[in-house]
């Protein structure tokens, strides 16, 4: 279960009510995932270890809720090795946030790969024999600019990278992704949408 210190840091005054509300949101998010035909997300929500649910997911959601009244967009950075669960964390938070009336968007460093020609030049002769993933294949400038504009009150316009194009070496997806939200996560987090419904920014 969540430690008293963590609950206090999240501003939780009534731990029992917090746990009850958290359980309700967890169950509602799993049911919505089932309704949307997303068994992978449903299983993540239903089978997660309690330490993840009560020690990370729900405290982080509570912290986001507390920030919603501050009037500034919230950005959360998530770092970790391949397979650590970064994408799952982002998907779970988005599902739980929807149950709390928050709209979240996710951005990934993988959407910041250099353009095709630049990657060919930068990664020519690399020992891995691939044209994405190795250090040097990313250019985060466009993503950084998009986030900064959004934090200044603009519309969130995220670059998107399609790994299925160019024989799975990938290239930028046409149009990217646009949405309105008050927080961004994954390499961005999220809060209530300006104008109501969730801002769906697909991965």
Image (tube, helix red, strand yellow):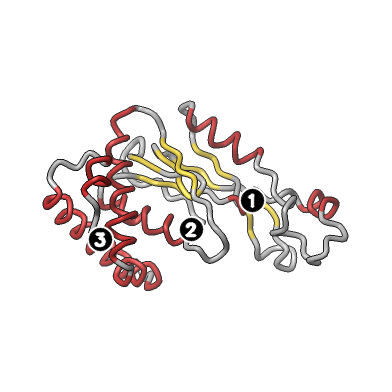
User: Which is more toward the observer, 82 or 35?
Assistant: 82
Dot placed on the residue nearer the N-terminal end, 3 or 2? 3
- Using a 10 Å C-alpha cutoff, classify the residue at mark 3 as few (fewer than 14 neighbours), some (14 to 19) or many (20 or more): many
Q: Residue 7 placed where, x, y %?
A: 23, 46
Q: Residue 202 placed where, x, y %?
A: 49, 54
Q: Residue furthest right?
A: 125
Residue pointed to by mark 3: 26
Q: Residue 170 placed where, x, y %?
A: 70, 60
- Using a 10 Å C-alpha cutoff, classify the residue at mark 2 as few (fewer than 14 neighbours), some (14 to 19) or many (20 or more): some
- Dot in front, 1 or 3: 3
For mark 2, give the secondary structure. Answer: helix
Q: Quadrant of the N terminus?
A: bottom left
Relative to residue 38, is residue 21 drawn left or right? left
Q: Are marks 1 and 3 in contact (CB under 8 Å)?
A: no
Which residue shows up at 23% across the image and 61% down it?
28
Which residue shows up at 33% across the image and 36% down it?
195
Q: Name the quadrant containing residue 44.
A: bottom left
Residue pointed to by mark 2: 86
Q: Are marks 3 and 2 in contact (CB under 8 Å)?
A: no
User: Which is more toward the observer, 37 or 4?
Assistant: 4
Residue pointed to by mark 1: 174
Relative to residue 3, is residue 80 drawn left or right? right
Relative to residue 118, is residue 90 drawn left or right? left
For mark 3, give the secondary structure. Answer: helix
């Amino acid at each position: 279960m969540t430690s008293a210190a963590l609950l206090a840091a999240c501003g939780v005054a009534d731990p029992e009510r917090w746990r009850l509300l958290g359980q309700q949101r967890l169950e509602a998010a799993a049911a919505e995932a089932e309704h949307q035909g997303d068994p992978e997300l449903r299983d993540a929500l239903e089978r997660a270890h309690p330490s993840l649910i009560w020690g990370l997911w729900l405290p982080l959601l509570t912290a986001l809720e507390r920030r919603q009244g501050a009037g500034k967009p919230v950005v959360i950075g998530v770092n970790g090795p391949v397979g650590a669960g970064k994408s799952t964390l982002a998907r779970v938070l988005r599902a739980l946030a929807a149950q709390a009336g928050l709209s979240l968007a996710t951005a990934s460093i993988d959407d910041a790969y250099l353009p095709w020609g630049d990657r060919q030049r930068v990664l020519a002769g690399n020992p891995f024999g691939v044209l994405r993933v190795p250090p040097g294949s990313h250019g985060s400038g466009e993503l950084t600019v998009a986030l900064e504009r959004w934090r200044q009150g603009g519309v969130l316009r995220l670059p998107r990278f399609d790994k299925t194009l160019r024989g799975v070496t990938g290239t930028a997806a046409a149009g990217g992704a646009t949405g309105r939200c008050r927080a961004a996560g994954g390499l961005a987090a999220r809060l209530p949408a300006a104008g109501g419904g969730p801002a769906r920014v697909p991965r």
